[in-house]
Amino acid sequence: QPVIGVLALQGDVREHLAMLDRAGASPCQVRRPTELSQVDAMVLPGGESTTMSRLLEVFELLDPLRKRIAEGMPVFGSCAGMILLARQVLDGRPDQHQLDGLDIVVRRNAFGRQVDSFETDLDVREIEDGPVHAVFIRAPWVEKAGASVEVLAKVPDTPKTRAAADRIVAVRQGPVLATAFHPELTGDERVHRLFVRMVGAQVDA
Ligand code: GLN
């Protein structure tokens, strides 16, 4: 079983640990560089990207994490995790750090006050057996994606989601996966299973 760390500085860490366990990985919490060096892959949870960015610096994880990602370690970021992985953030804090794992520009808190938090069903590429129920909580969306980024899901055009229809909310670039929503909160482990498969493919290669 691949050892997958969950960045445990802030955010919904426990939920990711539980889902990774159900998805067939061996999960552990990561707070120190020595812990990071022992994992095959990492999950960056949802929470508050500005706080996580600051804590990454305080816990001296920023550079080691950037280095592992640059070396090809698989990473999955949900919501705030997606923001951290992006190469650029719109409406972020000017001192917010980026991990540069994805060639995307994200807009923070993109859905605006009216639809601050909402749920919808999404068709997600690479995930079979029907749509994924997606929970969005003060979520970002992907404003721009580079040519090497695979778009996995877009917001559907329903009466409830019309203002955000067609916005990109799940992407993959090689070993890096990100969702604007929170698959760790719904009890459906298919997104985590996809990630565990990606990690397996990388570890075997
Ligand atoms: N709005 C948060 C941020 O900017 C993300 C919200 C979340 O992770 N649920 O970091």
Image (spheres, rainbow, N blue to C red):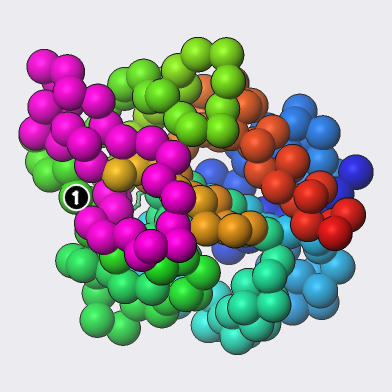
- Horizontal and vertical percent for residue 143? 23, 56
Q: Nearer the viewer, residue 36 or 121?
A: 121
Residue 155 lies in magenta, yes or no? yes
Q: Residue furthest front?
A: 147
Extent of the magenta region:
140-167
Q: Is residue 97 above or below residue 105?
A: below
Image position of 167 (left or right of 175): left
Image position of 94 (left or right of 45): left
Residue beneath label 1, please? 110
Q: Specify the quadrant of the image occupied by residue 116.
A: top left
Image position of 160 (left or right of 175): left
Mark 1: amino acid: Ala
Q: Specify the quadrant of the image occupied by residue 105.
A: bottom left
Q: How many marks?
A: 1
Question: What residue appears at the point 35 percent right and 77 percent down from the top-left corner?
Answer: 96
- Horizontal and vertical percent for residue 74? 67, 59
Q: Nearer the viewer, residue 146 or 203?
A: 146
Q: Answer few, some or many: residues within 10 Å of disc 1's Cα (few below 14, many 20 plus, some between 14 and 19).
A: some
Residue 108 lies in magenta, yes or no? no
- Horizontal and vertical percent for residue 19? 68, 33
Q: Is residue 106 above or below residue 26?
A: below
Question: What residue appears at the point 21 percent right and 67 percent down from the top-left corner?
Answer: 90
Q: Residue furthest top?
A: 130
Q: Is residue 118 above or below residue 168?
A: above
Image position of 65 (left or right of 57): right
Instruction: Give SS at disc 1.
Output: loop
Looking at the rendered image, the quarter that the N terminus falls into is top right
Question: What residue appears at the point 81 percent right and 62 percent down from the top-left corner?
Answer: 39
